[in-house]
Image (spheres, rainbow, N blue to C red):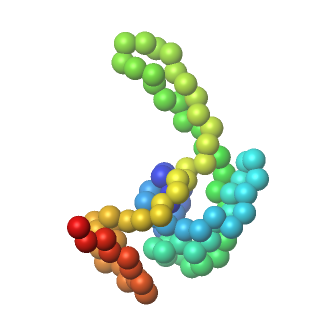
Amino acid sequence: MITANIDVADGLANGTLGKLVGKSNWLLKVAGYANAKGIGREMVPINRRSATVPLNQSRSIHAKRNNFPLKPACSLTIHKSQGRTFDEIVYKYS
């Protein structure tokens, strides 16, 4: 799942789902975006992004992270899945 807005016009936005199909130290290739509009199911390169993150409010020290704006997503909440169609689902009722 993408964790940042990369190209909103093409559907590469925060929360978009896809499949990792290749990687290197500085580039990921992803495919199969479920709700991408302009890119269909083609592979899309995603580069690392830098972000400055403040450690706390009382100190001016900043930590700089350089990572891919992606995280594993093995499941979805009912809110995230609204408006989508799935061939199969697993539901745990307790």
Q: Quadrant of residue 51?
A: top right
Of all residues, the one furthest to the bottom in this rendering is 87
**Left or right: 60 with respect to 94?**
right
- Residue 55: % across, % down: 45, 22
**Left or right: 22 with respect to 33?**
right
Of all residues, the one furthest to the right in this rendering is 24
Front one among 53 and 89: 89
Q: Vertically, is 87 above or below 57?
A: below
- Residue 18: % across, % down: 55, 68
Q: Residue at x 50, y 16 (%)?
A: 61
- Residue 38: % across, % down: 54, 75
- Residue 90: % across, % down: 38, 76
Q: Is residue 38 visible?
A: yes
Which image quarter is the C terminus in? bottom left
Q: Is residue 8 visible?
A: no
Q: Residue at x 73, y 57 (%)?
A: 23
Front one among 10 and 79: 79
Of all residues, the one furthest to the left in this rendering is 94
Q: Quadrant of residue 56?
A: top left
